[in-house]
Image (cartoon, rainbow, N blue to C red):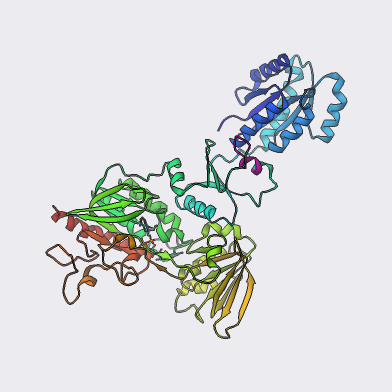
């Protein structure tokens, strides 16, 4: 963090030099001394300091300047640095103007020229002002700032991306802060023009307008390219199953790479509190689980490429070649598919218009704070919906759960049902479903149908979170890997039909447990046909798969 600034402004070069010299000799060890020879030049300096998020402790301006007088300059400068102390340098004849300035323009002090000796006529007053400033000074936020509007789906994606990759950042809602001069100044680039939103500003003042996650990843040093192009084991998907396999694989000596499209943690990373994972009696958040697993995997030497997406697969003899979204590729002997599932949308009229702008799928935890004091609607009756309702109840005035069935009992764990019953600001509306979403560029209302009566009621709504189940996205595997009609990947005994091995199977043995229709390509977690959709089962499968991969690698030539 650079030192706070003392800025002095005077059009008389001799006076300017003298003030600067005296300020330096007493304050240079704690403050950066800057000077300007006119009000406009000083304003330009202040704009730059502001855009770099630097602190200004004191502005000392001469009253008589040609472009703008000292009082006028200090009044303008206050807009940018309201907490900075303001002092006016005056000649004897200006005493009345100075007194008026203290009263009207909130100038903190006026100093008479000449100020010699400074030990008597300058430093005592400035020491006082600076001590005062230091007492109430809170260092400005130094990290990444993301500016945007609540209803922008791109801004929402970026917030999610940063949060899920554990990158600390400050969110600035430019609509909520539209009257704040500091926010307005941040929006302007060095040419004084307004930047396009969402805008991300890094601590070194670099600005990215409307950036892709990949551009941010590059800037903050997330790794999206591999160091080498051949691995013993490549894992696609960084949810609990992929992370577990990565930890076991690398700790047992396999050269391992993991490719993750969004952020390590997968769906589990969206969970506000996982209460049924062994060894954590008071539960832990999915983000916390993901962060710990990433540290563990990295410690064992796993290369994690994120954000990076696998988009194609080729098989060349014993080599499995994965094509990545940026056109690069990696090869391996054993490939593990751990790509999980993606959340489904409702498919009701109006949904496409408001997706990501008030309507969120399977997550939205970063939105919780924006929902303060609002009514939040949660759709779904399974554990994920229940957890979300409990989480949002901490922020929202009321949470309404829209559940298609008549009761939660068949779809939700009893501990969650009991928890929900005890929270006074959660209402469960059984036998209801959303028929339509209203709003042009963001959600403004929903129409809710009652299953029993068929009646349709419209409610104002700004926040709707949907948890209605998920499907795998496995088209990128082409015809190589056999899947069921819904896209889940078949493995082991599920591949044998009437005792016959799958078409194109090249090995002289049956597919192993967790092995797909291609020898050496394994599958674990939610994407596997017949899997138990739980964190613990994904982690268990990840560990088991590594044992089977060792057996496979022992024979591969
Ligand atoms: C809100 C919520 C709460 C939950 N709560 C619990 C709970 O309390 N207890 C419990 O046991 N389970 C819970 N679950 C379920 C649990 O999270 C999942 O069963 C588990 O995460 C599945 O792990 P996975 O590794 O198989 O897949 P996922 O977690 O789905 O991870 C798959 C990963 O693969 C990535 N990916 C997909 N395609 C590609 C590609 N082509 N290239 C690169 N990467 C790709 C995805 O981005 C994703 O990160 C919850 C789920 C949700 C959504």
The residue lying at 41 percent from left, 44 percent from top is 222
Residue 288 seen by the camera = yes
Residue 455, given in percent of the width and then of the height, sits at: 60, 82
The vertical placement of 210 against 46, above or below, is: below
In the image, taking residue 354 as reference, residue 535 lies left or right, namely: left
The vertical placement of 49 against 177, above or below, is: above
**Residue 184 colored magenta?**
yes
Q: Quadrant of residue 401?
A: bottom right
The vertical placement of 453 against 308, above or below, is: below
Magenta segment = 183-192
The residue lying at 28 percent from left, 59 percent from top is 543
Looking at this view, is 132 or 300 the one in front?
A: 300
Residue 493, given in percent of the width and then of the height, sits at: 21, 71
In the image, taking residue 251 as reference, residue 150 lies left or right, namely: right
Residue 541, given in percent of the width and then of the height, sits at: 29, 63
Residue 82 seen by the camera = no
Looking at this view, is 76 or 123 the one in front?
A: 76
Residue 180, given in percent of the width and then of the height, sits at: 68, 45
**Residue 483 colored magenta?**
no
In the image, taking residue 347 as reference, residue 374 lies left or right, namely: right
The residue lying at 64 percent from left, 44 percent from top is 183
Quadrant housing the N terminus:
top right
The vertical placement of 14 against 353, above or below, is: above
Toward the bottom, the furthest residue is: 453
Number of marks drawn: 0
Q: Quadrant of residue 66?
A: top right
Q: Quadrant of ligand 1?
A: bottom left
In the image, taking residue 520 as reference, residue 246 lies left or right, namely: right
């Amino acid at each position: 963090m650079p030192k706070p600034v003392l800025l002095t402004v005077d059009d008389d070069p001799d006076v300017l030099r003298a003030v600067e010299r005296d300020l330096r000799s007493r304050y240079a060890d704690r403050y950066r001394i800057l000077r300007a020879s006119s009000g406009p030049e000083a304003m330009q300096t202040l704009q730059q300091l502001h855009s770099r998020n630097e602190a200004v402790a004191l502005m000392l301006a001469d009253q008589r300047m040609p472009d703008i007088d000292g009082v006028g300059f200090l009044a303008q400068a206050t807009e940018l640095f309201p907490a900075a102390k303001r002092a006016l340098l005056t000649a004897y004849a200006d005493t009345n103007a100075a007194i008026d300035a203290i009263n009207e323009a909130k100038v903190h002090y006026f100093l008479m020229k000449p100020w010699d000796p400074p030990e008597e006529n300058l430093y005592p007053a400035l020491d006082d002002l600076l001590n005062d400033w230091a007492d109430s000074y809170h260092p400005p936020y130094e990290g990444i700032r993301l500016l945007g509007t609540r209803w922008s789906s791109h801004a929402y994606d970026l917030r999610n991306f940063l949060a899920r990759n554990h990158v600390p950042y400050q969110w600035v809602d430019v609509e909520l802060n539209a009257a704040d001069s500091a926010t307005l100044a941040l929006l302007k680039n060095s040419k004084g023009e307004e930047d396009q939103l969402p805008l991300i500003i890094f601590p070194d003042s670099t600005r990215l307008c409307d950036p892709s996650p990949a551009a941010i990843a590059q800037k903050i040093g997330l790794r999206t390219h591999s160091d080498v192009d051949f691995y013993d084991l490549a894992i696609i998907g960084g949810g609990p199953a992929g992370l577990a396999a990565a930890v076991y694989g690398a700790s047992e000596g396999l050269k391992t790479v993991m490719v993750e499209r969004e952020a390590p943690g997968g769906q589990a990373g969206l969970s506000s509190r996982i209460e049924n994972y062994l060894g954590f009696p008071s539960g832990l958040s999915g983000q916390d689980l993901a962060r710990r697993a990433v540290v563990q995997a990295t410690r064992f030497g796993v290369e994690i490429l994120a954000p990076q997406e696998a988009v194609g697969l080729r098989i060349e003899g014993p080599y499995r070649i994965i094509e990545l979204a940026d056109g690069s590729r990696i090869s391996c002997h054993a490939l593990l598919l751990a790509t999980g599932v993606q959340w489904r949308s409702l498919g009701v009229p109006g949904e496409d218009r408001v997706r990501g702008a008030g309507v969120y799928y399977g997550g939205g935890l970063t939105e919780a704070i924006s929902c303060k004091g609002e009514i939040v609607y949660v759709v779904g009756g399974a554990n994920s919906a229940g957890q979300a309702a409990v989480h949002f109840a901490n922020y929202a005035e009321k949470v309404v759960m829209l559940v298609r069935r008549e009761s939660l009992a068949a779809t939700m764990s009893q501990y969650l049902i009991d928890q929900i019953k005890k929270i006074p600001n959660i209402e469960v509306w059984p036998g209801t479903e959303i028929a339509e979403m209203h709003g042009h560029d963001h959600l403004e209302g929903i129409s809710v149908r009652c299953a029993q009566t068929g009646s349709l009621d419209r409610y104002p709504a700004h926040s709707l979170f949907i948890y209605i189940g998920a499907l795998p996205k496995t088209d990128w595997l082409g015809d190589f890997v056999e899947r069921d009609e819904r896209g889940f990947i078949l493995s082991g005994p599920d591949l044998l039909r009437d005792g016959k091995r799958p078409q194109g199977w090249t090995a002289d043995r049956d597919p192993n447990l967790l092995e797909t229709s291609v020898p050496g390509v394994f599958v674990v977690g939610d994407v596997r046909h017949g899997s138990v959709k739980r964190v613990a089962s994904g982690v268990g499968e990840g560990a088991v798969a590594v044992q089977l991969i060792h057996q496979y690698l022992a024979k591969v030539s």
